[in-house]
Image (cartoon, grey):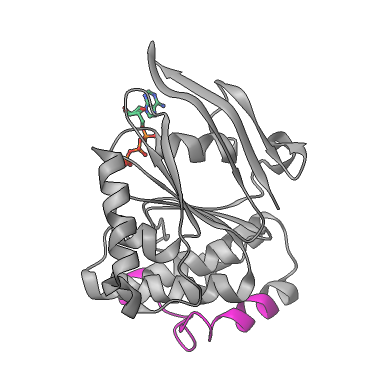
Amino acid sequence: MKISLNNIGQIYDGKKVLSDISFDVNESEFITLIGPSGCGKSTIFKIITGLEKNYTGNVIIDGTDIEKYQGKLAYMPQNDLLLDWRTLYKNAVLPMEIEKTDKKTMNERIKKLLPEFKLSGEEGKYPYELSGGMKKRTALLRTFLVDSDIMLLDEPFGALDAITRSEMQQFLLEVCEKHRHTVLFITHDIDEAVYLSDRIIVLGKNPAVIKGEIKIQISKPRNTDVLLEREFLEYKKKIMDMLV
Ligand SMILES: Nc1ncnc2c1ncn2[C@@H]1O[C@H](COP(=O)(O)OP(=O)(O)OP(=O)(O)O)[C@@H](O)[C@H]1O
C-alpha cells in the first residue's frame, strides 16, 4: 500500500502547526518522521488515521481518499494503552474483537504470532505482570493483528531503558523485514531513526515544514555493528545539521 500526503496544512487556535507537508510512503518502506518536540508529528498521524479532520490538503492511500481507511490502519500511539483488566491475549485481540472477527480465526492468528513476539506461554498474564519490553511487544503484536499492511508507530520505544530499547529495535527490524509491512515511524532519537529506516523525513517547527529527506542506504538486514560505522555517523551528522 502506498500513502501520499499532499500539501497538508493544519491550524490550531489560529496558529499554523503544519504547512505544506507532502511526501509519499512506498510499499514495504520504513519511513521515520523526526523533528523537535511539539512540531506536529503526531498531528500528521492523527490526520492519516482520520482522528483529525480539520486540515487542508489531502491524503491518498492506494489511490483512494483516506475516508475508506478510517479505523482500518494499524496505529500504535505513544502510550502502549494496554487495558489493566484484560490479559495479554485479550489486549492483543481487541482490534479483532472490535472488527467482530470470529473466535477461531482470532485464535489462529494470535497463536501464529505469539512465538515470533517472544510471548508464548505469557498470554494469560495481566499488564502488571509484564516487563516493559513484554508490554511493548504486546502492544506491537496488537498492532500487527490489525488487518492492515500499513503501520503507524508513534514513538513506540520512548519510555524504555536503553538495553530493552535496543532489543526492541532489533526485534522490530526483524518482524518488519519478515512481514514486509509499510511502516511510518515517529522518534526523537536520531540513532533509532537511522538504524531502522529506509528513509527519514526531517521536520522543522513553527510551523512544521519538511526540512529535508535522507535515504538511508545501509543494506538490510542490519545489526548493531552498523551503529559504529562511518556511514552511520555521517547520516547522524547530516540529520543533526538539518535539525539545528
Ligand atoms: N487538538 C489540539 N488542539 C490544539 N492544539 C493542538 C492539538 N493537538 C496538538 N496541538 C498542538 O499542535 C502542536 C503539535 O502537536 P503534536 O502532538 O503533533 O507534536 P509532536 O511533534 O508529535 O510532539 P512530541 O514530539 O512532543 O510528541 C503542539 O503545539 C500542540 O500543542
Q: Which residues are magenta?
A: 107-130
Q: Is residue 224 magenta?
A: no
Give the image quarter of residue 145. Answer: bottom right
Measuring from the top left, give residue 216's x and y in whole percent: 45, 59
Locate residue 39 relative to residue 210 in the image: left or right: left
Locate residue 120 relative to residue 205 in the image: left or right: right
For the point 61% across and 23% down, which residue is it?
A: 57
If the picture is divided into quarters, which one holds ligand 1? top left
Locate residue 85 relative to residue 129 in the image: left or right: right
Measuring from the top left, give residue 235's x and y in whole percent: 34, 57
* Residue 36 in sight from this viewpoint: no
Quarter of the image where the C terminus is located = top left
Measuring from the top left, give residue 234's x and y in whole percent: 30, 59
For the point 42% across and 39% down, which residue is it?
A: 212
Q: Is residue 115 magenta?
A: yes
Which of the pair 43/119 is nearer the observer? 43
Which of the pair 136/56 is nearer the observer? 56
Measuring from the top left, give residue 144's x and y in whole percent: 58, 66
For the point 66% across and 59% down, which residue is it?
A: 149
Relative to 5, residue 172 above or below = below
